[in-house]
Image (cartoon, coloured by chain):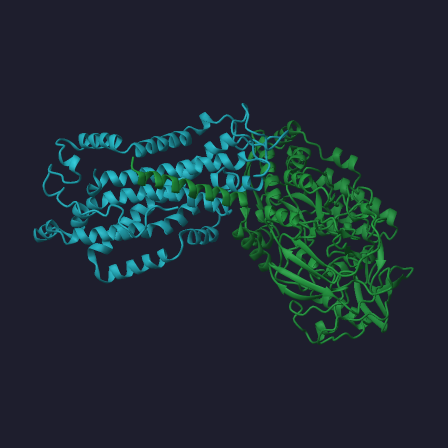
Amino acid sequence: MTTVEPEADPTGGEPKDTVQIEEGLSTLTPDQQALPGSGRARLAASMKHFVSSQPLGTISGMIIILLLVASVAAPLLATHDPSAIGRVSQLDAPSTANWFGTDELGRDIFSRVLFGSRVSLIVATFTVLFSTVFGTVFGAISGYFGGWIDMVTQRIVDAVMSIPVLILALFIAALLGGSVRNVVIALTVVYTPRFARVARGEMLRVKNAEYVTAAEALGASSWRTIRKHGIPNLLAPIIILSSLTFGQSIVAEAALSFLGVGAPVTEPSWGMMLSRGSEYTRVAWWGVVFPGGALSLGVLAFNLFGDALRDHLDPKLVR
Amino acid sequence: MTTKKWIRLLALFSVFALFVAACGGGSDPDEDATTDDTVSAEGEEDEDFDDRAAAQQEGEDEATQTDASDEGSGDPVRGGHLIISGPSDIGNLDPITSSSFNTQYRIGRVYQKLLTFETGPEFGYTQNSLKPELATDWEISDDNLTYTFTLREGVKWHDVAPVSGREFTSADVKATFDAILAEGHQAALLERVESVETPDDYTVVLNLSAPFAPLLNNMANHFMWILPAEAFEEGYDRNATFIGTGPFMLTEREVDVVTKYERHPGYWEMGVDGEALPYLDSMDFIVMNDTQQVIAAFKAGEIDLVTNGFPKELRTQLMADFPEAQYGEWIDAGMGQVGVNMNREPFNDLRVRQAISLAIDREGMGAAIRGGGTIPSNVAPAQADFALPEQERVELLPYDPERAKELLAEAGYPDGFDATLIATDRYGALYTQQTEWLVEDLKAIGINVTLDMLDYSTYFGSRWPDVEYDLQFGPQTPFLEPDEWLRGQLQTGASRNWYNISDPTLDTMLDEQLGLTDAGERAAAIQEIQRYVLEEVMNPIPVWTYLTQWTSAPDFQGYYRHNAYGFTGIEYAWLEPES
């Protein structure tokens, strides 16, 4: 389901190296270059450009915001208690009372889809957060210092990346037991290497740039060089990779829940709803279609947003 | 927007379509793998299963047996290859060390017992009418301390080394019973047996230390398979070599995939045509866990006998799609129970346990999830002679959340309390649904339950037996003897007392019924024990006994199910040739 090769640098771009040296004369992207003034103004202008040049990305962004609102405000938006069982009837078709119908225990699927978004988003958010932080730090250090540190780090990365994502995640999650926390741990382990790989690649380029040599010649410490020159230049590709990984984490979480090693059964999650609903597809299509639709929509939004972000941040692809 | 982007969008959609389709197909190999791994890892597991038609019982309660008997079809036809499906398998087929139903089902027609249960149109599904098998006759001394069995002559073991088709004798019975007494999981079935004597080749004498009412019934128990003496003396691997006296020989086996059988040419029992049984030439017992897959295979004629259970909606759909097939539904021999750890507060308070029982909407749960069944008492309702009558069970186990809240308040918990409930998903989707239902019922009276879904080996290997829980929910083994239900679970220090129950009055009552050899007296005593348990102990709390289902192809005839594990009587069944 991935649209990006994990090894590939999603930006395919050149190091954007002069930002820090020549204050105010950013070369990040041409449109940004043309914009004088504060960072906030630049961001606003950049967003404006994004909206005008990336309609699909903008729609995706709006869907993402909707999803966030839905999950945060789930208790307010839900028409029913998501775990309240229907004592009288089950597997009811969608109606005005139950917009998305009810499941095999007579629970309201609309409310469960809303609450299910929480599990998905929580898992995806923390997975992306942790794998971004760990991956960037390891990658940057690995790329900057090279030598045996690089050797060891990259072999570990190779080893982890050689195992298919879902298989490894399944293994770790099954080993740790089913809980939201453990799914985050499993997915973080699985996704960290791709961030490390991208961060290292960027760092290798940054390291050989003249401004870094200059900084080192002026006596800057390794830490300062990484922090001031390295990390800021890694950010664009990492942000793009994050947004794509976000979508993939949602799918991976759903897959793990589907296979029964994800969130506990008492917590509604899209993957589990799909798994349960699939048993009844022939008699109750709504049990699969609505959680499946929510999942597809969510992942699609994140992937398209990631694509748009790449186009937007990549100076080479400007039209 | 560029064309490239639209293509990408389209591609994404098709990927998701595939994803959803894959889910719909329901084929879920990982689930199979997990289930089977736990099974293989667990030699001692033996309780009931969701999707299994394990044991069924009840003469009177006989539900809707619409199978072979209804056809009233003609004479048996010889030949034919039968394919049976079941949801899971187990790595250990040694009857001495594995109590799993999966083991007993796979070896059930390979080995035989001294006695067995009658099957047939005139016998109830759960009726335990004893029938001679390897023994032809038995005699009980007046003091009830000596049981003498006369063995059948001319019975041959399967022609497989090292036994190589020799005749079955009393030495085999003694070797088997000695092994069971020494190391068998089923040793309790021979409790009070002090010694086994073999005065001649066709006589076995059991000497008891005290009267033991269940003994005769236990001889037909599906754990009492007789093996050749060589299995113990020479110690061949009982999980690799299968030498029995039964109508079928186990010829090939791949765990979790298939177990294959061929007819035993030297079998002793004759069919209606005067030739040796069985009528069938061979059988395959395949493992298929996915409901959608089983239904598709059954409709396509690839399975003749389905032991898997289906959710009620899917079964209804199947019956509409394939009306000519045979659908049987009987009251299951087991029950789901809530276990309560009486060493922990507040569960040591009877009022709290009563409140838990009152909180459970049993009828609602049974109807919604199982589509039928009955409220059990502490002996499975399938054992109609011993279980409390249905009317009484319903009265003793009502659904009354208001009264439950009052009881909690009286016990000092007007606002309820927090508790953890352990369960496992190993028993299948329907049991998981029942667990979720139960959690909601308890929440409704203020008991805020955290569900701890354990993997099977943790659940059955440590947490439940070691009584490391607040509350526990799951099926109990479908025991064939009321004594296993009662004394095994309720007596202080009993092997299956995984609830910390210790009640001196109850202990005395449990001991007293053992010596009652008059069937009527014993039944009355056993019913009295159940009344006492439901009024004064309320642990383990009986929840629901569902209807077990078997489904078979239109051409499969002459097979009448019985509650005991092991396809009892399948040697009398046949497949009608294609017309």
Residue B397 lies in what quarter of the image? Answer: top right
Counting from the top left corner in percent of width and height, residue A144 is at 20, 55
Tell me if B296 is positioned left or right of B521 in this view: left
Answer above or below: position of B40 versus A70: below
Total labels: the figure holds 0
Q: Is residue A74 above or below residue B104?
A: above
Residue B249 position within the rendered picture, expressed as x and y whole percent measured from the top left: 72, 66
Which is nearer the eye, B191 or B110? B110
Tell which of B496 and B8 is nearer to you.
B8
Judge whether B496 appears above or below B202 on screen. Answer: above
Residue drawn at point x = 55 percent, y = 25 percent: A95
- Furthest-front residue in this view: B579
Residue B434 shown left or right of residue A110 in the figure: right
Q: Is residue B147 visible?
A: no
Q: Which colour denotes chain A?
A: cyan
From the viewer's side, name the closer residue of B56 and B535: B56
Whether residue B487 sits left or right of residue B463 in the image: it is right
What residue sits 90% from the left and 62% below the top? B141
- The residue sitting at 80% across, 73% down in the picture is B171
Residue B230 image offset from top left, x and y in percent: 72, 74
Q: Please, which residue is most extreme toward the right here?
A: B142
Identity of the residue furthest to the top in this view: A96
Residue B47 location, x and y as percent? 66, 52
Q: Colour of chain B?
A: green
Q: Is residue B253 visible?
A: yes
Query: Which quarter of the image is occupied by the C terminus of chain A?
Result: top left
The one nearer the camera, A83 or A191, is A191
